[in-house]
Image (cartoon, grey):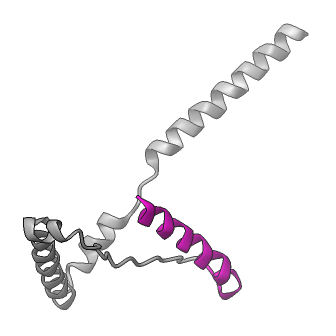
């Protein structure tokens, strides 16, 4: 009886681990597919191109020796989205987002 219980437990654990490993492989973000869809809109694509050019120019400026010699603070705009959050959860979600930004700022 104990042998059967051990065998059943082992079989159950193997099944759980197999499902857990398989489910992690299937999980995808969806950001790339979303951006490809958005880039089909010519207005969005143009704005994205302008933003990218501005970003690259600012990056070149920040990497320059002049800028680094000044030891200036680099400001990076951050957007936080909670697609499933509701108004009742807002204070908690804002606190969570702020704590993550604080961690980034410390780094």
Residue that sits furthest to the right in the current view: 1
Report the front residue among 37 and 60: 60
Q: Is residue 29 above or below residue 45?
A: above
Residue 91 sits inside the magenta stretch: yes
Quadrant assignment for the C terminus: bottom left
Magenta region: 85-107
**Residue located at (44% from left, 62% from top):** 106
Residue that sits furthest to the bottom in the current view: 43
Please state if 40 lies on the left or on the right of 89 as rendered: left
Q: Is residue 11 above or below residue 15?
A: above
Report the front residue among 70 and 64: 70
Please state if 1 lies on the left or on the right of 67 as rendered: right
Report the front residue among 75 and 91: 75
**Residue located at (14% from left, 81% from top):** 54
Residue 97 sits inside the magenta stretch: yes
Q: Main secondary structure of the magenta part?
A: helix
Please state if 25 lies on the left or on the right of 82 as rendered: left
The answer to which image quadrant residue 13 occupies is top right
The answer to which image quadrant residue 72 occupies is bottom left
The answer to which image quadrant residue 44 occupies is bottom left
Q: Position of residue 31 (x, y in %)?
A: 35, 66
**Residue located at (21% from left, 78% from top):** 39
Query: How many numbered markers are drawn?
Result: 0
**Residue located at (53% from left, 78% from top):** 83
Q: Position of residue 76 (x, y in %)?
A: 31, 75
Q: Position of residue 60 (x, y in %)?
A: 9, 70
Q: Position of residue 92 (x, y in %)?
A: 67, 76
Quadrant assignment for the N terminus: top right
Report the front residue among 16 and 56: 56
Please state if 14 lies on the left or on the right of 70 as rendered: right
């Amino acid at each position: 009886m104990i042998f059967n219980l051990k065998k059943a437990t082992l079989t159950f654990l193997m099944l759980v681990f197999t499902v857990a490993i398989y489910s992690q492989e299937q999980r995808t973000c969806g950001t790339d597919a979303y951006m490809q869809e958005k880039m089909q809109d010519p207005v969005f694509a143009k704005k994205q191109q302008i933003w990218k050019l501005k970003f690259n120019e600012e990056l070149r400026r920040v990497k320059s020796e002049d800028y680094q010699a000044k030891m200036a603070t680099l400001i990076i705009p951050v957007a936080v989205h909670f697609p499933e959050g509701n108004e009742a959860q807002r204070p908690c979600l804002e606190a969570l987002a702020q704590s993550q930004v604080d961690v980034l700022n410390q780094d």
